[in-house]
Amino acid sequence: MASVTFDHVWKKYGDVVAVQDLNLAIEDQEFLVLVGPSGCGKTTALRCLAGLEEITEGQVLIGDQVVNDVAPKDRDIAMVFQSYALYPHMSVYDNMAFGLKLRKMPKDQIDARVQESAKILGIESLLKRKPKELSGGQRQRVAVGRAIVREPKVFLFDEPLSNLDAKLRVQTRAEISKLHKRLATTFIYVTHDQTEAMTMATRIAVMNKGKLQQLDTPQVLYDHPANLFVAGFIGSPAMNFFNGKVTSEGDALFVDLGTFKVRIPDQDKSLYQDIVGKDIIFGIRPEDIHNPLYAPPGIIAEPVHVKVDVTELMGNEIFLYLVNGEHNFIARVDPRTQAAFGSEMDVVFNMDNYHIFDPSLDPENPRSVAVAKGAA
């Protein structure tokens, strides 16, 4: 078991920067998820840690040891790949035992480790089968089992659930979380699926264009996104964004969005006095837009008149695609809501939970100015 540190790590392919000045400290026994869109650098960072890619600048440490020049086989890590990477001509038992045989471990120790790992994963009955006789979920368990038998300091997972169907992804996700608690080992997990990240991670590192955008617990990322990218990436459906201005009318502050405006709660006015009159981006999550009839009691509710463009009945909730002037946005509302295509209605924005981003701080990646009290 060990901590992992990326110390000012860069990875370049010619003029292309895949990982840019990555500083990341992963604690012993932590379950850290690297998440971001395709091409953000998350898998490259993982491969640099595994020794499958040579870093351009910086240092990678496992525990207190700098491993830049240590061969992958000597780093005491085990990696689970998206493609399973099983040997098709070998049985499940032999696939799991192969790495230990290469290390010339005694047969009785190999057998004990394979049997124990198979028991942990519930695949004891599959040990004599070949990979072609297994389902996708079973193959993934074998791939995980092959990693477990090595008893490494660090487990690396590179999008291991991508090839599974939706139901099996949910099941396997839970199994990997339980496995982490049982093994009490450092897990580093790469995915583009923010749902996987939110449900599994101790902490999440959000990456985009090779840069670390924010590192924190799932709830803090959800409640306090550092910038527009994180706000839009974490949460499903994504946060709604509106271009507007902060305006002052008498003693009150408003977010003026052109075709409508919402009042900023009085207790939050001091947060935004300095940006009155400036262009901003206003953000609110679909789950914070309610049918007034079923809005949670006690919220600061700002009414907005809308036209219903599309309805999606999800059973336990309804997704409403709404229009107000030039603005198109999504609400997650109570399933008792009566709304039809083309109808008009009022919704309320929960102003206990809203976000304002200032594009002038970083035009390409607007930063959060402040988050209202409801998200604190």
Image: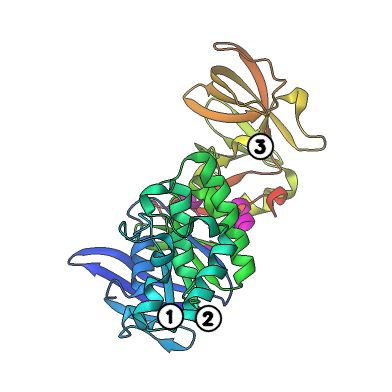
The residue where tag 1 is placed is 76
In the image, 5 versus 263, the foreground residue is 5
* Mark 2 / mark 3, whichever is N-terminal: 2
Element under disc 1: loop
* Mark 1 / mark 2, whichever is N-terminal: 2
Residue 115, given in percent of the width and then of the height, sits at 54, 68
Q: Is residue 214 magenta?
A: no
The residue where tag 2 is placed is 2
Quarter containing the N terminus: bottom right
Residue 143, given in percent of the width and then of the height, sits at 43, 61
- Confirm or deny contact between disc 2 and disc 3 (CB under 8 A): no
Element under disc 3: helix
Residue 357, given in percent of the width and then of the height, sits at 52, 49
Instruction: Select label 3 or label 1 by which is in front.
Output: 1
Is the residue 108 above or below the residue 47 in the image?
below
Residue at 50 percent of width and 44 percent of height: 280
Q: Is residue 367 visible?
A: yes
Instruction: Select label 1 or label 2 by which is in front.
Output: 1
Residue at 28 percent of width and 71 percent of height: 53
Amino acid carrying label 3: it is Asp
Q: Which residues are magenta?
A: 215-230
- Confirm or deny contact between disc 1 and disc 2 (CB under 8 A): yes
Q: Which mark is residue 288?
A: 3
* Mark 3 / mark 1, whichever is N-terminal: 1
